Every structure is written in structure tokens, then in C-alpha cells.
Image (spheres, coloured by chain):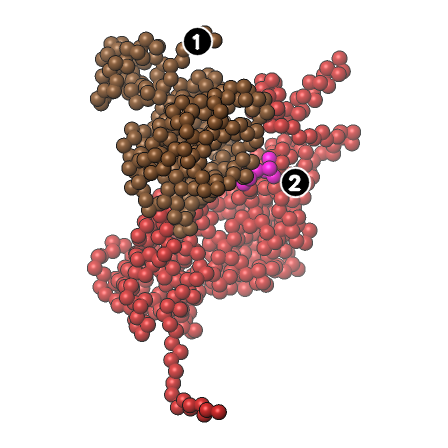
Amino acid sequence: MSGPPYHLRANKAADRFALIEAIRRLHKLGVELEEYTYYGLGGAYLEDMRLLYEYCPEIAMISIEEKLEIFKRQNFHLPCGTLRLENCSVKSHIAQYEPNDKKSIFWLDYTELHYECFDDFITLLTKLVIGSMIKITLRADPRDYWYKSRRIQKEKAEKFRTEFDTLLPRQFVDLPRQYEDFAYLVQQMLEIASQQALPARANPLTFFPISSFYYSDGTWMFTLIGVIWPRNDKVVVEGAFGDWEFANLTWARPKLIDIPDLSTKERLHLQQYLPCSSPRGVTLRAKLEYLIDEDIPKTESALEQYAAFHRYFPYFLRGIP
Amino acid sequence: MNKAKQIRDQTLSALPFKSFFVSMLTHDIKLEDAILDLLDNCVDGILRSKKQDGNMPYKGFLAEIEFKPDLFSISDNCGGIPWNLRDYAFRMGRAHDFEPDVLGSLGVYGIGMKRAIFKIGRYCLISTRNDKDQYEVEIPKTWFDDESDWNLPVRSARRSLETDGTTVIVGNLNPGIAEQFVDEKMFKTGLERMISTNYAYIIDKGFEVKINGDPVKPRTTKIVFHMPSREEIPGIRPYIFKTTADGVDIFLTVGFTRPIPSQSEILDEQESIRYSSIDAGWTVLCNDRAVLYCDRSEMTGWGEAGVPRYHTQFIAISGIVEFCSDDARKLPTTTTKRGIDASSPLYLQIKNKMREGMRIFTDYTNKWKGREDESKKQIQRGARLSLTEIKTESQRLTFNATKRSIPPGDLYKPELPLPSIIEPMKRRISFVKEAAKIKKVAQYFGDSDMEPSEVGEKCFDTIYGEAVK
């Protein structure tokens, strides 16, 4: 995957914080966080586990890593004693996973878009108990299917249709070219997958969406968070997450995370004006008194993004080891 | 011993219990098949309305399906239900001496609409307009509870329909049906796929079907047809057989839909979770309706009489066989119209031709194994044609009359290109490596999208270059 190192990707960092925020709201469902175990693909630096330990230390954690050398590197970077490392593939782990009536939080953090990812998602949904949460991240970059040659482009679209035939909400001739439209297509495919896993006629539980985003740190990605809950009890889920700024409880179009590049000095300057009333981008532009993009509308749009995600956006500073 | 009481002479009622009748009628039919029954009625209505001639006989006709968690409806402009057909439309079954009023009608047994309605719910309103007849029939929930009343009330239409057609609204959905509609996206995806395959050729010929406002696109098979300047030059063309037998017109064609798969593609397919061969195999049409779609089983001749069982190697091979008759009873379909009657003598005869055609193309894939790139160039020279286009283009071909085969007919056997003989001293190199390592080497060569076989070949050529220095 192209882009900055994994642990320094700003938009990914904001997406990671959004998960922490969603987890912190789980107690509003009437559950206790210490009942949960978190399963993630932490990468070499175990960034999500480090963050989760800071905000929710009561949650036990398990990291799943297939590659031996990265597993060894994870062992070196263990952030706490409540994290257990497992050296196996996601597929293998899901196949052997038994909830034993315990609640789980899974982050299926994929870097590609393959049917196997949806298959893992479906398999996991059929196993998770009530109150469990899944976050799934998938590659959603329409540029993967853009080709100068019309013939190759059609072949790629045909291959996509063939691979995802049972998950497509509509038949199509050409794949969506806009990033938001492509991300929305992936979201709809996940919605269908969740219905296949937990069909209404056979299961009182369903997968409620909580939030969804699309972003790029070099490659466009889509991410969705949802919770397993009785389908007739939607009001509880709405009560727990409905007032969250980033909630998407209706499978509406995903939100964009596109945090602008601002210096630490600029961020500290703007911090004193946040939170502010809408339109936030206009307010902040007036405080900066200059443009940070090509024109006023783009600057205000970028600053609106900053205002929305500023609390989730870490400061990247050079430290002396 | 007590003396048994003698029952005096009297009569017993053998009338069916309504609840038993309704449940038996709907027990084994899937919801999607019930909806297809309603679409079949639309097509019958089109035939009754005298569809146009030419390549788009269904153009101008439309069926709109809508579903919500508490309601189902289907509206069409396909001519409506004539008053004089009320018995056929609304009584259960049909009279033994009933003759179909339309040529080629898909409906034979007179139960499709009723079965569909009973499958979906316990309330129904049917509004219809046919030329000068306009009326409504309501089946209230109480009708199902009253065992003695088999009559249905008819009344003048409360809402005037603008065109000749029918609207069927079903409410009070049965348990299980409402839940399927709750999973709206999943159900719509599945229904759309079913209609796009079963009705592919009817939609392709102009019939419009919408589900919750979205039009259904047809999934038709297109076969490569390369017509060089001289017919005798070998080229990638389909095998074609056509005939008429006992009032049934038959057109059969089989060929390639795409280049044959490379060895690495076959390997990837075998390791993949999902079978991606969904467009390969035989589609069997009866009066434009697909009763088998992309079948790859013994039902269509795979694995029989010299034809190998279906394998990913044959992913590029597809065939269409079309049966057309004014009398639907002569078509080789099952009673549900959703499958082929495997014991039909007509179908068994045609299956011989299907196998004969398939062998030509399975044989080609064996001959060109390892030389898929060369084969790909040949196949890409041809255009992918629809069934209608193949019928048109094939008129330029020279057919042989097969008088002694059963059934007799006109046959075109393509002469496919043969590979030039490989020098005997060449050998294949084939091995398996981790995908991540292959990608790394491809990146090293400057193209991360290289196919594994190209990476292997370049590695060999590079080292060979070093070795001969």
C-alpha cells in the first residue's frame, strides 16, 4: 500500500479514534466494557491496541498476525500486559473462534478488496453474540479499475461483477468512478452480506450500522462500524449512538475523512475557537485570515473537516528517544 | 361382544378444505418462483395482446414489482385479464377441455397467479383492464377463514387504469414473507439476479421489468463469432444446429464467450472461495424463458458420452439452446416451468447435439493448453454476438443438412484453429511460490501487475542470459 508509514497516516488515525469513540459508547447499550475482548490486526506497532489501552484499559485484547517477522516485531512493541499476541491468519482465527457467550469487538482491517473479506465478515457475524461490535476496513479505490483501454476496463468490471455477484445491490456496466460512489457501493455490499449472515426470517439479531467513512492516505479506503443487537430493539441502539456526530444508523452514504495538512502552530491557534457553531469552516477561515487551499470554498471545506475531526487527529511530533 | 352401530345410507362431503388446498399449493414453491409466476402471466398477456414481429417483440411492455415489509405489488401494461378468461384466471386449476387462448403461452395448469398470491399474503386486490372490460377482484382475509365460500366478489374498478394491464396488490403478508422483505437489499439482489437470468432473453427483446423502481438488466450469453473474408479459413465460430420437430423450432449454438483460461487462472480459481464460472455452461430457453441458466451438470451433457465433467478449464465455453412452440405443452419443461424434463424424448435427442458441439470446444482447450496467449489473440479477433445476432450472421455460413440424424436438421460445425506443432525439445516449467514473493519479484522487474507466469518466465530468461555469458 502506498502512502506514509501506517502509524503516521492522519486520516487512518482519525478513523482509529472514531472506533475508540464508538467503543466508549457501548456502555449505553446497558453492557459493561470489561465484558468485551478486542480482536485486531495491530500491525508492527500495535497502534490500535495502544490507543485502546489508553482509553479503555478494562478491555482484554488479542492481536492476530500471520507473518512471523511482524509477529516478532509486535512482541517487541507490546504496550501492556493485557494484550495477547497470536500468530495465525485471520481466516484461521475466525474459523476457530468460539465466543462462549462472551462479547467481542473485531476490527477486520483489510488492505485489499476480495470476496474472502466479505466471507470472513459473514462467518464472524454468524458467531458473534448480542452486543458485539465489528469494524471492517476495505480497499475502495476506483482507480484500481481505471484503464486507458476500454476493453481492459470492461474486463476488470466484468471480473468485479463475477467475483462479487451475490453481493452487488444493482447490476452495472461500468464501476463507479467517484470515490464516494465507490465507497457507497462497498457499503451496500456489506449491508447485503450482513443480511445474508443474519436473515430476518431466521434470526432475531441483526447487524446495525453505527458509522461509516471513506478516506485516503494514498489509497482510498472504506470503513464501517456496526453492532449486533436484536432487530426489534433498534431504539436502544439509537439511544446509544444517535447523538454521536459521526453516527450513520441508516446505511446512509459514508462520511469523508480528509483532514487538511496544518502545522502544529496553526492547529494550536485554531484550537481556541473549537468547538464552534456551523458553518465551522467559514468561522475558522476567518480566524486564520489566509487560504490553505486553492480557493475559499476548498479552504472552508478543509477547515470544516478539521473542525469535525480535530479531536481525533493526533499531533505528530519529533521526539527524542 | 357389543354390536357395531350401523351408519345409514347418506352422502359425505369430499370438498377440499380451503386451508389444506392453499397450504399444499404453496408449500414447495419459493417466494422468488412465485413472483416469476406472476411475471409469466405478464408475458402471457403480451402474447394475448399480439406482440410485435421482429427482433424486439416485447418492446413497449412493462412490469413493475414493488415490495415493502407490509406490502407486495406488481403492475403491468400487458393487456389485462379479459372477462371471458375469468374462470381460467380466478378458479383453482382449469377445465380438462380448456384450450390455451394464446399461442405459446407459458401458463398451462391455471394455478400460477393464485399460488403466488397465497404464497405471499392473505389479502389481495386485483385490478385489471382489458379493452372494454375493467373490473376488480378482492380476496379479503375472511375468505381464507370461510371453508364454505369459494366465490370471489367482483366489482367495477374503483380506480380507472390508464392502459390495458393488471395490478396485483397483496397485503397481510404471511409469516416468513414479511421478514424476507425486511432484508430489502438482499432480497432485491436475489430477485433481480433471478429475473435477469430467467427473463434474460425476454428483457433483451424489449420487455421492461423494474424492482422498486430499478430496471433489471438482462444477463444474456454472447458467443465469439469471427467471420474472416473467406469462410474456409479456420476461425473461432460457434457450433450451430437448427431444426423443427413436432411443432417445436429448435436453435442450438455453443462456443467461446472469452479467451480460454491460463494455467495460473485455473489455479487461482481452484484456490478461491467463490466459483467465478457463473456465465459458463448451457442456457436452455423455452418460448424465450430461460428454464436452465448456465448449467454445468449432466442435465446438459457434461460428464457424459465423451464430454468431460465441467472444470475451470472450460470456463470460456457457453451454449444456448432455444425451443419455441405455439403449444407450450410440447416444450420439454417440468410442470413448474423452472426446469427441463430430463426424460423428454425431444430433449434427449437435442442433448446429443449439445454434447457434439461441446466436444469441439473442450477439445480445443486441451490442444491449446500452455499456449493460451496465442489462443487469446485468435479469440479476441472475433466479436461477441447475442443469440439474435448469431442467427443473423449464421445465414452467411454453409450448413449441412443432416437427414439421417435424430432429429434431422441443419448443422454447422466450425473448423477451429489448431496449434502449430511444438518442437519436441521444449519442456514446461511449473512451480508454486508465495504470492507476496511473486509480487516482490515483479516489483523488482518494474511492473507489480505482472502475471505470475510472466514473472517466472522473466526470471528464467534473466538467469539464462547470465548462464550463457
Residue A60 at x, y percent in the picture = 45, 30
Residue B355 at x, y percent in the picture = 63, 52
Q: Is residue A321 above or below residue A56?
A: above
Question: What subunit carries mark 2?
Answer: B
Q: Is residue B110 magenta?
A: no
Q: Residue at x 21, y 59 (%)?
A: B158
Q: How many marks?
A: 2
Segment colored magenta: B268-274
Label 2, on which residue? B365
Residue B33 at x, y percent in the picture = 43, 56
Tell me, by letter, which chain the rendering colours brown: A
Q: Residue at x 67, y 21 (%)?
A: B459
Colour of the chain lettered B: red
Q: Is residue B270 magenta?
A: yes
Q: Which mark is residue A319?
A: 1
Question: What subunit carries mark 1?
Answer: A
